[in-house]
Structures are given as structure tokens and as C-alpha cells.
Image: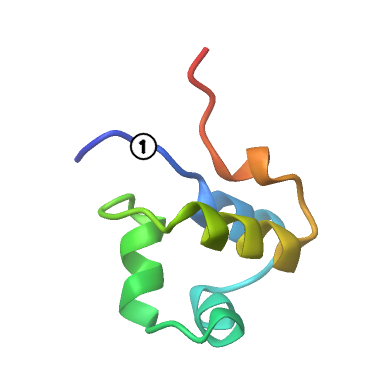
């Protein structure tokens, strides 16, 4: 497995939301959300912003710390 850049999966769990909820909210395919949650691919910066807004969290909570 590659570098764990985002923590979208954890943020969804912490907010009691599902991948399906995020896919429906963003108008994205469920497979795309799954790839984001497993860090196989990453959404764009604007999408990270939308996810943070939907979850009512700071965008920094969607990223793993580097230090």
C-alpha cells in the first residue's frame, strides 16, 4: 500500500457517515469514494474543501500529519 495521505475514511467514521452518503452528496461514483478512502487515489483540493464543508470540519482533519 502507498502513502496514507488522506484520512477521509476516518473522518467519515468519526462523523458517522458512509462512503455512499459522501458519493451521493458529491455526485460521485461510489468506486471513486472507495479509492479515496483507501488512498489509491486522491481528490482535488476543491473536493477536499467540499468534503470538509459537508462534514463541518477543518480541512486539515482530512490529512494525515507529516510531523
Q: Which residue is drawn at the image coordinates 19% and 40% (left, top)?
A: 1
Colour scheme employed for the rendering of this structure: rainbow
Compare residues 58 and 10 and report the one nearer the observer.
58
Q: How many numbered circles does the render carry?
A: 1
Res 33 quadrant in image: bottom left
State the SS at label 1.
loop
Give percent across and percent down for residue 67.
Answer: 52, 12
Seen in the image, is 59 located left or right of residue 40?
right
Image spot of residue 57 (x, y percent): 77, 51
Q: Is residue 6 left or right of residue 41?
A: right
Vertical arrangement, residue 46 with respect to residue 61, above or below: below
Find the residue positioned furthest to the left: 1
Query: Does residue 60 appear to the left or right of 7 in the view shown?
Result: right
- Above or below: residue 47 compared with residue 1: below
- Is 6 or 43 nearer to us in this picture? 43
Residue positioned 51% across, 86% down in the render: 27
Give the image location of residue 51, x and y in percent. Answer: 62, 63
Residue at image point 51% right, 45% down: 7
Q: Nearer the viewer, residue 59 or 55?
A: 59
Tell me the residue that label 1 is attached to: 4
| Residue 64 on image: x %, y % | 51, 32
> From the viewer's perspective, is residue 25 above or below residue 32?
below
Residue at the limit of the structure toward the right, as seen here: 56
45 versus 63 height, above or below: below
**Label 1 crowding class (10 Å Cα cut-off): few <14, some 14-19, many 20+?**
few
Amino acid at each position: 500500500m502507498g502513502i496514507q495521505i488522506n484520512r477521509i475514511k476516518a473522518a467519515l467514521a468519526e462523523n458517522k457517515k458512509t462512503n455512499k452518503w459522501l458519493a451521493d452528496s458529491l455526485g460521485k461514483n461510489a468506486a471513486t469514494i472507495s479509492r479515496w478512502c483507501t488512498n489509491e487515489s486522491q481528490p482535488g483540493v476543491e473536493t477536499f474543501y467540499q468534503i470538509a464543508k459537508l462534514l463541518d470540519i477543518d480541512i486539515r482533519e482530512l490529512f494525515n500529519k507529516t510531523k
